């Protein structure tokens, strides 16, 4: 772990991507981390910048919160807006993607006969939010679009068109579609831009849960794609300190999101608004630690020093493809997306665990205990479409050897778990 402060560090030549980058992270040297996708990991130069910022806050809390904070926040929003092809006043920061999705869905004025559409792969807390909204008045209807992998983008688009055609909006009512850009489990990229177009043609609102996009999906242009709402975590793949997410609401829809959550002191009743009242509500809506929000700036500096978004993601994408193939060879199984059309930096490989054994909390706990405590290694695991899978995240600190190590770990974990369950021949 380096002790250099980031201004001094960035004057030096950057390291080669792979294990040379590990010295810029605080990982246990014995830990094999192939699960960046769940929580992200903050580089030590970013942690150093956050520490300095914290000291600045504590030196004079009034000066920071009343005068210094706002310009720093606006600059971060400006840089994020540039990265995702949006206007700065269409971009605000929230704690995480779940908060962003909740902010959007809970601002809609629901009516009897309205519909919320999710997917069977929708992230857990977002799925529960959808169902909670349907449990309270006026009880909007919940429908589900099924996604079963392996599949192709072509099939997804065709099936979604058919689904939309069979579920038209009732006249005078609204339909909101909550769709991932990159599914969490399995870790696959959806053709979300095309799905947005289908929603628009049908008169549906599109809410894109892009929790995994920023920092993993390059050349995002929201002004061109035109989702109605788009939310992405910045602490997963963009290297900011957890937790912080960007919430994008284009001007055409800002009248829908009337209030931040919690409601800001800057809130103005819609009937009384003479000026825009969207972005300002997120400049102060309660006392929290805002340093994760501001950590986006040094995170972007760190990534630019390493070579920028394209270089980083070319490395991670190539490693995901090669690593997935190697892992499947070791496990004697298969890659979910062998052609790589749905793969960015997360790759899904089937585990050598009986398909007939259905998921339970006991199995989940055994997997976690063995992986994390005994083997000091981790890649996500899940059951989908009748099979057990692991999702491996390829990050800038990983190399092919990490996939080989996690493969051997998984062979041991699966065997040990089956023996403990009395299922081993």
Image (cartoon, rainbow, N blue to C red):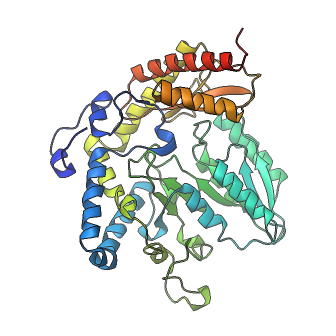
For this view, does 391 lie left or right of residue 134?
left
* Quadrant assignment, res 295: bottom left
Relative to 97, residue 367 above or below? above
- Comparing 155 with 311, the one in front is 311
Residue toward you, 413 or 10: 413
Residue placed most toward the observer, 199 or 348: 348
Query: Which residue is found at the position 65% from the left and 71% from the top?
Result: 107
- Residue 250 position within the rendered picture, expressed as x and y whole percent measured from the top left: 54, 67
In this picture, residue 424 sits left or right of residue 113: left
Q: Looking at the image, which residue is at 30% across and 74% down?
A: 61
Residue 255 placement (x, y as % from top left)? 60, 76
Report if residue 413 is visible in the image.
Answer: yes
Number of marks: 0
Quadrant location, the C terminus: top right
Query: Residue 424: where, in percent of width, then height?
Result: 70, 12
Quadrant in which residue 76 is drawn:
bottom left
Q: Is residue 425 above or below residue 114?
A: above
Which sits in the foreground, 315 or 198? 315
Q: Is residue 387 above or below residue 3?
A: above
Which residue occupies 40% across, 19% down?
401
């Amino acid at each position: 772990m380096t002790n250099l402060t980031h201004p001094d560090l960035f004057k030096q030549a950057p390291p080669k991507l792979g294990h040379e980058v590990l010295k810029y992270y605080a990982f246990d040297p014995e830990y094999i981390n192939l699960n960046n996708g769940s929580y992200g990991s903050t580089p030590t130069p970013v942690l150093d910048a956050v520490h300095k910022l914290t000291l600045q806050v504590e030196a004079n809390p009034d000066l920071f919160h009343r005068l210094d904070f706002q310009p720093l926040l606006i600059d971060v929003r400006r840089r994020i807006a540039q990265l995702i092809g949006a206007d700065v006043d269409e971009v605000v920061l929230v704690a995480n993607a779940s908060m962003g999705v909740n902010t959007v869905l809970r601002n809609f004025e629901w009516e009897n006969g309205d519909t919320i559409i999710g997917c069977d792969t929708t992230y857990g807390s977002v799925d529960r939010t959808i169902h909670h909204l349907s449990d309270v008045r006026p009880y909007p209807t919940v429908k589900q679009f099924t996604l079963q992998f392996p599949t192709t983008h072509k099939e997804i688009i065709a099936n979604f068109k058919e689904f939309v055609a069979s579920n038209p909006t009732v006249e005078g009512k609204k339909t909101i579609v909550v769709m991932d850009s990159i599914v969490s489990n399995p870790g696959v990229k959806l053709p979300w831009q095309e799905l947005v177009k289908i929603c628009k043609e049908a008169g549906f609102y599109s809410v894109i849960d892009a929790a995994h996009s920023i920092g993993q999906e390059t050349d995002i242009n929201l002004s061109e794609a035109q989702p109605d709402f788009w939310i992405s975590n910045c602490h997963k793949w963009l290297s900011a300190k957890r937790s912080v997410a960007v919430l994008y609401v284009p001007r055409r829809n800002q009248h829908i999101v009337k209030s931040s959550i919690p409601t800001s002191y800057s809130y103005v009743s819609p009937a009384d608004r003479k000026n825009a009242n969207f972005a300002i509500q997120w400049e102060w809506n309660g006392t929290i630690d805002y340093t994760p929000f501001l950590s986006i700036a040094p995170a972007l500096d760190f990534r630019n020093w390493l070579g920028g978004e394209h270089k980083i993601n070319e490395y991670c994408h190539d490693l995901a493809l090669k690593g997935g193939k190697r892992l499947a060879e070791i496990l004697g199984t298969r890659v979910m997306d062998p052609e790589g059309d749905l793969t960015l930096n997360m790759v899904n490989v089937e585990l050598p665990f009986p398909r007939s054994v259905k998921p339970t909390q006991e199995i989940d706990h055994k997997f976690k205990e063995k992986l994390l405590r005994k083997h000091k290694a981790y890649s996500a695991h899940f059951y989908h479409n009748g099979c057990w899978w692991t999702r491996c995240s390829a990050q800038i600190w990983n190399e092919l050897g990490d996939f080989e190590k996690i493969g051997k770990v998984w062979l041991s974990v699966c065997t040990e778990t089956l023996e403990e369950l009395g299922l081993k021949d």
